[in-house]
Image (cartoon, helix red, strand yellow):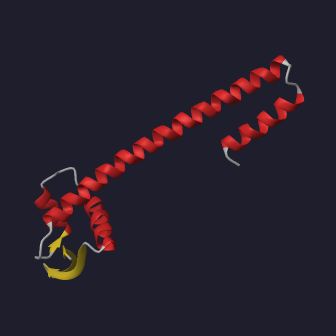
């Protein structure tokens, strides 16, 4: 049961039991205030999610812009972007999204005796 559902139950109980009781009125006011707080909290969460999505879209476009016909590993992509705040996990997530969208192809390459995943434009 969510908070909003609990507030609905409280409101239905107190609105039918004693509408002219001062205590019931206080509780109904509190429920209205708490619902408004939940609405504000949800709106802020949506705004933060939209900002993060936009930042992810920019990074995804930057990763795609670096790629070409020559296979590049995650480390090479990070070097090409030249941003120290980027981590392999962030780049891997964006390349995975690009592969799923069909914009990038994934292949295996050997480097330093290891098999690494490399990416090229589709």
For the point 20% across and 67% down, the residue is 74
For the point 29% across and 75% down, the residue is 102
Q: Residue furthest top?
A: 22
Q: Is any atom of residue 87 visible in this view?
A: no
For the point 20% across and 74% down, the residue is 119
Q: Does 108 sit above or below residue 4?
A: below
Q: Does 101 sit above or below residue 30?
A: below
- Locate the C terminus by quadrant: bottom left
In the picture provided, is 20 more to the left or to the right than 55? Answer: right
Residue 85, position in %: x, y? Answer: 21, 50
Residue 108, position in %: x, y? Answer: 22, 82
Q: Report which quarter residue 67 is drawn in.
A: bottom left
| Residue 26 vs residue 16, the one in the foreground | 16
In the picture provided, is 26 more to the left or to the right than 76? Answer: right
Q: Report which quarter residue 110 is drawn in.
A: bottom left
Q: Is any atom of residue 115 visible in this view?
A: yes
Q: Report which quarter residue 9 is drawn in.
A: top right
| Residue 109 vs residue 100, the one in the foreground | 100
For the point 22% across and 81% down, the residue is 107
In the picture provided, is 65 more to the left or to the right than 4? Answer: left
Q: How many marks?
A: 0
Residue 80, position in %: x, y? Answer: 11, 61
Residue 58, position in %: x, y? Answer: 24, 53
Q: Does 116 sit above or below residue 87?
A: below
């Amino acid at each position: 049961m969510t908070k909003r559902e609990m507030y609905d139950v409280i409101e239905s109980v107190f609105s039918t039991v004693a509408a002219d009781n001062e205590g019931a009125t206080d509780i109904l006011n509190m429920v209205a205030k708490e619902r408004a707080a939940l609405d504000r909290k949800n709106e802020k969460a949506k705004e933060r999610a939209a900002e993060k999505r936009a930042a992810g879209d920019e990074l995804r476009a930057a990763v795609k812009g670096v790629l070409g016909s020559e296979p590049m590993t995650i480390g090479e992509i990070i070097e090409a972007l030249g941003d120290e705040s980027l981590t392999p996990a962030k780049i891997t997530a964006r390349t995975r999204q690009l592969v799923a969208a069909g914009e990038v192809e994934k292949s295996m390459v050997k480097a330093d005796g290891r098999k690494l995943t490399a990416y090229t434009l589709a």
